Image: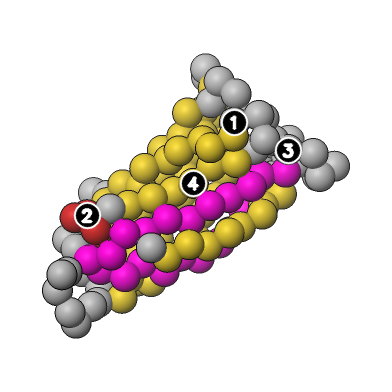
Amino acid sequence: IIMANNTITFDPASGVSYSTNLTINTGANFKSTFKVVKPDKSAFNFTGYSGSSQLVKSVAVGATNPATASFTVGFTSAAGGEFNLSMGSTTTRTIKPGRYVWDMLVSSGSTIYRLVEGNVLVLGGISSAP
């Protein structure tokens, strides 16, 4: 499992997402953990929120590419502002090596924020799973 720990500052009033890049190895489990804090460094409370996250090859003007794959979003401590993104080896095995873009949306009722976004580098493997 590749594990990345990210602490990000999010200010809902600004509406600006945080940018972070990810690396996924094909055929391996992926997991990245995040802790979200407000500008005053207190935890962003995700109680009552849900999240969704996907990666796609391109978001160029006019591109109509469907999502390549979806991450599982798991709030590990909603009140503490903590969540993880994960993707199992069965899914990563189906992604072709290359560069992708990703984002994560969180919502509560009619409030939706693009919380984080960035690039994804997908690396091809050589060995098959044991």
For the residue marked with disc 2, what is the amino acid? Thr
Q: CA distance from mark 2 to mark 4?
A: 17 Å
Q: Earlier in the sequence, mark 1 or mark 3?
A: 3
Residue at (47% x, 28% y) in the render? 50
- Between residue 1 and residue 21, name the one nearer to us: 1
| Residue placed under numbered mark 1 in the picture | 78
Question: Camera-side residue: 109 or 84?
Answer: 84
| Distance (Cα) linking label 4 and label 1 | 11 Å
Task: Left or right? Give the position of 98 relative to 44.
Answer: left
Q: Residue at x 14, y 74 (%)?
A: 128
Q: Residue at x 58, y 50 (%)?
A: 34
Q: Residues within 10 Å of mark 2 (few under 14, many from 20)?
A: some
Q: Residues within 10 Å of mark 3 (few under 14, many from 20)?
A: some
Dot 3 falls on a residue whose secondary structure is loop
Q: Is residue 103 above or below residue 29?
A: above
Q: Which mark is residue 70?
A: none
Magenta stretch: includes residue 86: no
Q: Say whether residue 39 is visible.
A: yes
Which amino acid is tagged 1? Answer: Ala
The residue carrying mark 2 is: 91
Residue at x 38% of width, y 63% of height: 1
**Three-letter code, disc 4:** Asn
Stretch in magenta? 16-37
In which quadrant will I find the C terminus?
A: bottom left
Q: Which residue is mark 3?
A: 43
Question: Mark 3 or 4 closer to N-term?
Answer: 3
Q: Tell me which numbered mark, 3 or 2, is placed earlier along the sequence.
A: 3
